[in-house]
Image (cartoon, coloured by chain):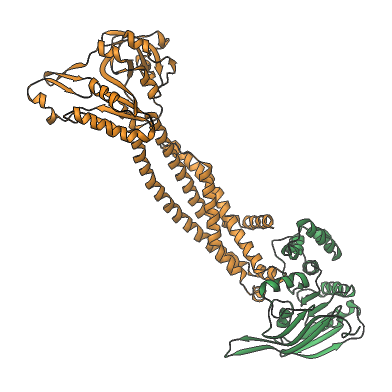
Chain colours: A orange, B green
Amino acid sequence: MFSELIVEALRNLMRHKLRSLLTALGIIFGIASVVSMVSAGEGARREILAQIRELGTNNVIVNAQKPPAEQNTKKAEGNYLLTYGLTFHDLQQIRNTLPPITDALPVHDVKDWIWFKSRRVEAKIRGVTPRYFDRLQLIPILGRILDQQDAQDRNRVCVVRARVLQEARYTGDPLKLDLKIGSEYYRVVGVLPDFTSKNPDRAILGLDDRALEVYVPFETVVDRLGLTKSTFDSGSWEMTRVELHQIVCTVDSEDNVTSAARGIQTILARFHDRRDYQVTVPIELLQSRAKTQRTFDIVLPVIAGIALLVGGIGILNIMLASVTERTREIGIRRAIGASRFDITLQFLIETVTLALVGGVLGVLLGVLGSKLIEQVTEWKPVITFGAVAVALGISCLTGIVFGIYPAHRAATMDPVRALRHE
Amino acid sequence: MSSTSASPVLALRGIHKTYGTEQNPLPVLRSLDLRVVTGEFVAVVGASGSGKSTLLNIIGCLDRPTSGSYHLVDEDVSTLDDLRLSHVRKTKIGFVFQSFHLVQHLTVEENVELPLFYARLPRRARRERSRAILDRVGLGHRRTHVPSELSGGECQRTAVARALINDPSLILADEPTGNLDSVTSAEIMKLFVELHASGRTILMITHDPGVAAVAQRRILMRDGRIERDEQSGPTAASAPEASCSPN
């Protein structure tokens, strides 16, 4: 019965192809916008998740921060050595006093030249411990990461980003390259992939999409390049001493991340008289981003609702016209035994079918639209089964809501008068 | 064949039908009594506005009388609600209309099967019945055509087939030859006579005295009342060809 009514409804729609298409247009665009917006939102949501996962949901990251000039009391006293940032003492305190923190890794950064024959490029030399790679899920595409032996022996080895090799225009075996950093040669033992996606939060880790990154054992950096750096700035030498640029702390569980971060704040506040550090919790970034996402989640249904309301009214209008046009048919059906319910069902199914066909076309258009979004913007829309199901559900519902009145009109016609209708 | 001995198909008692408002009532049927028994072929004649169509609509359960009782095959249908009336229409009554009243976008067999569709009969059973009946009215070769591809006579045959498919107790025809030329009229009337001969009960409205002459019983209506009710001698067919000649 149902299937035959649906077939009949489809036949009726096909008899007026243009009219059906125009009627469904509102639904088509409404659903298309829903699908493409939901998929764009879903894509953004997944990207945020991936970005946060890149930073590590169990991590708390402490960065050294150059304090504002007026706070540099030592410089004001005529001392040209600027000391700020995190210290070995901080590291020790964090490791020893906060039980939820299972690991704290030091990072020391140095900006230095790397030489390609006579050409030089400024690179970011990062002194890191072997576990750093593990913690931030840095997986080499070639060779290996730094290991405990490198750290113990203070080996002159490095792991580089693929871009470094590109910049060097080096085409040979990367693992046979001796890279000249400053005045010394370092053997390349591993190559890390370049960043393929953008992640604005990456800067918190001290990672830069554009910088040429060279990873060297922490101990090697401290021993060979030292902790004090001299720069020639506006006519005078300036000395800067930073022991640690970053401490990557790992917490035993996600639930303890926030309290551990608070603990770190307390410890650092006790030993620092200036704000020369910053504590960042990646998982909190996730939460604030998710909040932005939620605004999107509210705006979207409103827009979709308006689109579907307009589409639904279009359908209502045409179905009312169709009922009037088919008055005689309704009279005939009633005369040969159709009940009011039969007539209601027939027109309701016709409206729902129209709305559903619109919905299906809308989904297809929406898929196309999200592909377009992918081409034009940097978003990566993700079309989920759920989004499609919801879209079709909504179009079905629109059909029911706006089909009830025309169907009711058709069903309550007086059969005698309907039969006489010309 | 005496109308008192056979079982009544329909019995109307004191039927009134009034249109218009309470202040300005417009009586169409006034205290009408009618009894039709199984196997009768009744022709209802009368001028326009005499209440023929209203009578037919009430008998056909498309309309309800303002007052009076109506029994159709031992069931009091004058008080039934819309759903029950629909059920009565689809199980006990077959309609044939002047302007055929076929659903234009459905094929001949789909039109014929429509009453069975509403009776929730499965598709295969419907198709079987419609084939048999279309063969019987001589339209077996037109099954998949749509009404616009058919001649008037063929349309009316389709309508007759549709009226027959639910094996009704009563066939109601509202000027079935009114839109047809004399030759096709004669053909359709022949079909009705055959139906009557096979035991069907038929009530037919007509303007055409020739058509009315075919019937075994003629009722003349005037001003919402039955003015004359006459039986002609032979039960079944007088020669239909002769009766349908143009006059």
Image-based side of A318 in relation to A83, left or right: right
Classify residue A287 as left or right of residue B52. Answer: left
Corner quadrant of residue A130: top left
Q: Looking at the picture, does residue A25 appear above or below residue B119?
A: above
On the rendered structure, is A366 left or right of B201? left
Q: Is residue B225 above or below residue A91?
A: below
In the figure, is residue A333 to the left or right of B215?
left
Query: Quadrant where the N terminus of chain A lies?
Result: bottom right
User: Given the current orientation, which residue lies at the most extreme left position?
Assistant: A77
Q: Is residue A324 visible?
A: no
- Residue A77 falls in which quadrant of the image? top left
Say if A316 sits above or below A48 in the image: below
Q: Is residue B117 above or below residue A299?
A: below
Please provide percent x and percent y for residue B102: 72, 67
Q: Position of residue B48 (x, y in %)?
A: 71, 85
Residue A2, x across and y down, in percent: 67, 57
Between A260 and A393, the residue placed more toward the observer is A260
Q: Position of residue A323 (x, y in %)?
A: 60, 66
State which quadrant residue A399 falls in. Answer: bottom right
